[in-house]
Each structure stands twice: as C-alpha cells, then as structure tokens.
C-alpha cells in the first residue's frame, strides 16, 4: 500500500511540474522572437510595445520632464508648448530613452537621452498615473514637418518603456508626446 501511495505521489508531482516523460525538450537560445512570434517574458520585443520597468536605487536623476511633480522649469524653446497640467495628471515620470546597439529593455535603457546614432533604439519611458494611450510624433525642427508618428497599441498604467529604431537621417528633432489630442511633453534630441 505504501509503494502504491509513493508511486501515486511521484506521478502527481511529475504531472504538476510538467515532467511527464524523460524525453528532453528543445529550448531556443534566441533572445528575440521571429517576426511572426509573440514575445515571451524572456524575449523582449524591441518596438513600441511597453515593457514594465522595475524601480532601481541607482537611476540617474531626471533632467527633462521626469519627476514632473518637482519640475519647476519650462521646456526649452520648441515648436509647441506642452500642457503641464495634463502631464502632471497622467504621468509621475516621462522621458526620452536610448538603448545602444546590442542592449535590451529594461537594463540597457539610458534615461534622458538627447544624442542618438542610426544604430540606437529610441523611445519613451515613464510611469503613468491614469490609464491612457500615449502617442508621439517625431518633428524635424529644420524642415518644420512631422517625419514619424506612432503610439502604444493599447492603454497603459504604471511603469512602461517602449523603443524602436532610429530610422531618420542626421539632424535635430523633437519627440512630442500626446495624450488624446493634448501635447504633454516635448523632448529635443539630435541624430548624429
């Protein structure tokens, strides 16, 4: 009877842990999904899809529109002025970030970036207080026109980050962030 109970317990544990056979299962070592695969928890998708960011004790102090509750200076001269009240309503932190070649979210995210190369990833990071779907445009300050538009695919709340390739020529730009149709932030940056 004890042997039967022991066998039953062993089989039950094997079922719970997924070890129903001794046949090895192939595991991919690819860190990025194929274009048609959905990302998994260990495979970040380097696009506009947000990634939760854990708070760290070693984060650099914010230089541009991060920690908006403490922000007392206005945004540098830009083509438009953001709505500070809407920014504070929706975000406790919002910034422009960069991931150098070979890096991945969230560990390789450089906050408050202003200089990019064609090989970098560019995108937003922050903390959303009230659920919203941020969208953005990249505005060419020399040509005075929008060169790229994008946004997150669904409403967000909490910590997030999303990046994509720097797919624009060298020059000076503004990364403008909107909630609904209200401009909430302008981040000047340069591509070299």
Image: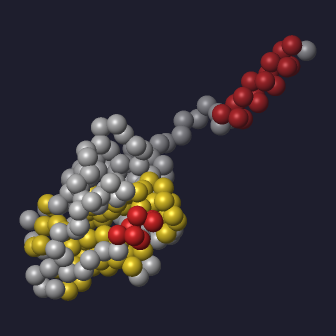
The x, y position of residue 98, in whole percent, is 24, 56
Q: Quadrant of the C terminus?
A: bottom left
34 or 118: nearer the viewer: 118
The x, y position of residue 80, in whole percent, is 24, 80
* Residue 23 in the figure: left or right of residue 188: right
Residue 14 seen? yes
| Residue drawn at (76%, 30%) of the image | 12
Classify 76 as above or below 45. below
| Residue drawn at (22%, 68%) of the image | 75
Most distant residue in the top direction: 2
65 or 35: nearer the viewer: 65
47 or 87: nearer the viewer: 87
Classify 24 as above or below 60. above
Q: Please, which colouring scheme is shown?
A: secondary structure
Q: Quadrant of the N terminus?
A: top right
Most distant residue in the front direction: 72
* Residue 166 in the figure: left or right of residue 11: left
* Residue 158 in the figure: left or right of residue 77: right
| Residue drawn at (23%, 67%) of the image | 74
């Amino acid at each position: 009877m004890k042997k039967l109970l022991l066998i039953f317990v062993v089989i039950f544990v094997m079922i719970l842990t997924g070890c129903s056979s001794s046949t090895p299962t192939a595991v991919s070592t690819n860190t990025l999904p194929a274009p048609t695969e959905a990302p998994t928890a260990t495979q970040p998708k380097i696009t506009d899809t947000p990634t939760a960011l854990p708070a760290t004790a070693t984060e650099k102090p914010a230089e541009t529109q991060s920690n908006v509750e403490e922000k007392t200076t206005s945004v540098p001269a830009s083509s438009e002025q953001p709505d500070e009240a809407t920014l504070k309503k929706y975000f406790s932190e919002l910034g422009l970030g960069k991931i150098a070649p070979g890096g991945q979210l969230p560990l390789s995210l450089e906050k408050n970036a202003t200089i990019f190369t064609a090989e970098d990833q560019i995108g937003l990071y922050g903390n959303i207080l009230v659920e919203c779907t941020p969208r953005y445009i990249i505005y060419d300050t020399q040509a005075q026109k929008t060169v790229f538009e994008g946004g997150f695919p669904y409403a967000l709340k909490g910590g997030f980050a999303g990046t994509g390739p720097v797919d624009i020529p060298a020059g000076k730009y503004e990364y403008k962030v909107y909630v609904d149709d209200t401009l909430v932030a302008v981040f000047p940056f340069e591509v070299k």
